[in-house]
Amino acid sequence: MNIAPEESSIKTSVGEKQLPASLRPFFELLDPDSEHPIAQCLLCVKKKTKNSKYKGFKNSLSNWEAHLSCMHPKENRKYRDAKAEEAAKIAKGQHDGNCFCPSKSKSQASQKSLVKITDHFRKDAAKKYSKHHPKQRQITQLLLKSIACDSLPISIVDKPSFRGLLGELNESYAIPHRQTIKETHLPFTEKLVINGIKAEMKSLTSVYVTVDIWTNRQMRSFIGFTVHFVDDEFNLKSRLLCCEHFAERHTAVNIANRYEDVVMRYQIDGKVRRVISDNASSMKKAFDFSLIDIKTTEMKVGNDEDIQFSDKEDFHDPNVDLDTLLALLPKWVSCFAHTMQLCIVHALENINTKLPNEAEDHVSKRVVIHSTITKVAKVARTLRASTTASEFLHKKNVYLLMKNQTRWNSSLKMFRSFVKAGKDVLNAAIDELAKSQKEKSALKLSSTELVVITELVDVLSPFEAAMSQVEGEKNVTISNVCAVVIGLKKSLEGMALILHICQVLSRILVEQVNIRLNPYLEQEDFRFATFLDPRFKADWLQTEEERDLLKQLSAQLTKELLKRKAAIDAENRDSPLDSAGSDHDQTSSSSEEKENAHRGLFSFMRSSMSKKKRKIAGPTQEKILEDEVEKYFAGDCESLDCDVLGYWKNEQRFPHLKIAARELLGMTATSAPSERVFSHAGELYRAKRANLGVKIFAILMLMRINSDLI
């Protein structure tokens, strides 16, 4: 620490301590050894003022200097001049050694060894970037991206340690404050992301939307929309449209209204072909546009509630094709993963339900399966709640899992953890925990129960394999559905023949698959997507009767291709290229009329035409498409590890099928993308950030999921 010359510690030759020479004409030191030495003002004594003694500080003259400055300004100027001269002499080493300061103390000695923190600051600090500087914008965008993607609090920019770090890395960067980020940078970045998503979807004709609702720790609801499509380069894209606070009741009307707001915000009205969600009744009603009776202009939303449209004349226009209008509206599709999970839940919950005229052998097997499932859940809950049992299992590298209603395949994972642990380890853990013999016998697993658990794993494993084929987001899933349904039925039917106890469960699961999953085989989107998958084509059709339907399905596919081509031609009808073509046609027709007039009466005769090449009528567009479809199905299927979109990107033989594949294969089979969005939402709304504002949360979620657009 730098100390002023007059405050330097200098001893006199006789051990006396005096004031600096510049201050001695004005003050007389009375008790220099005191912690707070007292000096008498000689000027105040001359003026005979009531108080002339003033306390000072052990290592400071500031109090006496302040007295001179306030009470004796003329003498203060003399003191300042004398002080400057004395400081110059001391700097040259010409001091008289009679400066006041008590003997060195430990604290003073330590102060001399200290260095001011400002001494480390560069005297030539770099000039800060302006707010429009490219480097300033780049670093700010990276900072915002880190806040959104790494779940950092916005207040981190106000932390001294964080600001010191950024200042050391780039001293020219002007670090924004928290309020600036909230009010300026986040809204700007939100617009940047939204405009980027709009630009990606501008040239598309078909996109697919998933929707779901989530509740956070404070029981506040949020609705999420994701969009999926294949771009011009045949890349599968997924984007988050929004994850916003949904304060309204979860009714069909409110969900539909929010959907309309999002669609209009991104300007994709008329482009959404399908909306995928779970099986909630409100979701189904919100997007089931067949409930709209356009002729009566009423939207049925319940038994007692109807919404009347204000302008009925728009719906009674005779020029409006109602079938065409309904075809433009998106159709609702239930999430395949949720529906498949319902098969498992229903089978496990109703395994103990006796059917009429059922054999006693089957009834007894149902009882054993039900009791085993109940016991496994109880053992897992008991052992996980005990620290003693948990420590014992941890030493054995055994981790038991619990069933979770909101997690797919959680029952299978619980059973599998029991099989991996083994009966001996589990029973030993129960011995460590249970006190009475009765309690031990109630929890210990028998050999028969372990066999049932093993068979349960075998029965439910095909559903896990099926789930991995349809819940992906970075690869095509829509084309796997039909093959997955057939594969599930084949696997379950085969297990019913080899299992001893769980054959009853496998038959129940087959029934559930027929009831809940077979309808997917009848939906055109799933059928056509499977046909357009070069790994499957028509090979997934099993029976001869189904193969006979291939011609009919090919005709439907051709019809669908014609519709798509007509829609694309209608969009391009007003393009400059078409206008030029129409002008060329008019010119050709006028020249032909002149030529016919020149031939006069004989113009009707073909033999009298000029020797130019005659136009020969070619095959119709429908015939071209039929030949293309037939040629495609005649080829061999690709291997199962084939990149579906990569195949169509490089395929040149089937141009019309290529367009259809790009539009159809972008559809996702499940609403799993929305579920993943809410997993990220849970990280943002963790316990320490439970009071995060809903508007800031929506922007952070948009940035986090679409981070590559920042």
Image (spheres, grey):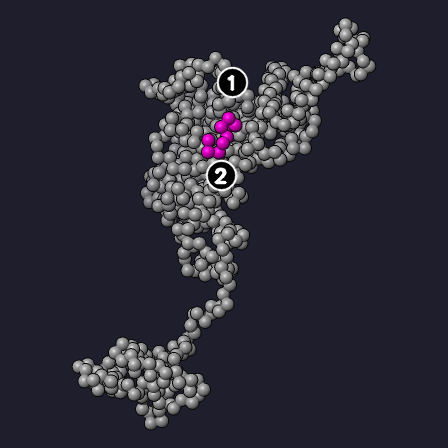
Residue under numbered circle 2: 194
Is 265 a magenta residue?
yes
Which residue is at a point 61% across and 15% down the rendered structure image?
552
Question: Where 609 sits versus 575, above or below?
Answer: above
Residue 335 placement, left or right of 102: right
Which residue is at a point 36% across and 41% down the rendered structure image?
217
Residue 205 placement, left or right of 610: left
- Does residue 486 show up? no
Around disc 2, counting alpha carbons within 10 Å, would you say few (fewer than 14), some (14 to 19), or many (20 or more)? some
The quadrant in which residue 610 appears is: top right
Which residue is at a point 22% across and 83% down the rendered structure image?
44
Please tell me which residue lies in front, 273 or 88: 88
Please tell me which residue lies in front, 153 or 137: 137
Q: Position of residue 254 (x, y in %)?
A: 38, 29
Give the CA distance from mark 1 to mark 2.
30 Å
Question: Circle 1 — which element?
Answer: helix
Taking the view exactly as shown, the residue that stands out farthest to the left is 50
**Residue range corresponding to the magenta coloring:** 264-272
Q: Position of residue 143 (x, y in %)?
A: 48, 51
- Does residue 93 show up? yes
User: In which quadrant of the rendered image does the N terminus lie?
Assistant: bottom left
The quadrant in which residue 694 appears is: top left
Question: Circle 2 — which element?
Answer: helix
User: Of the residues shown, which amino acid type is indicated by label 2?
Assistant: Ile
User: Of the residues shown, which amino acid type is indicated by label 1?
Assistant: Thr
Residue under numbered circle 1: 324
Please tell me which residue lies in front, 168 or 546: 168
Q: Position of residue 105 (x, y in %)?
A: 34, 82
Image disc number at residue 186: none
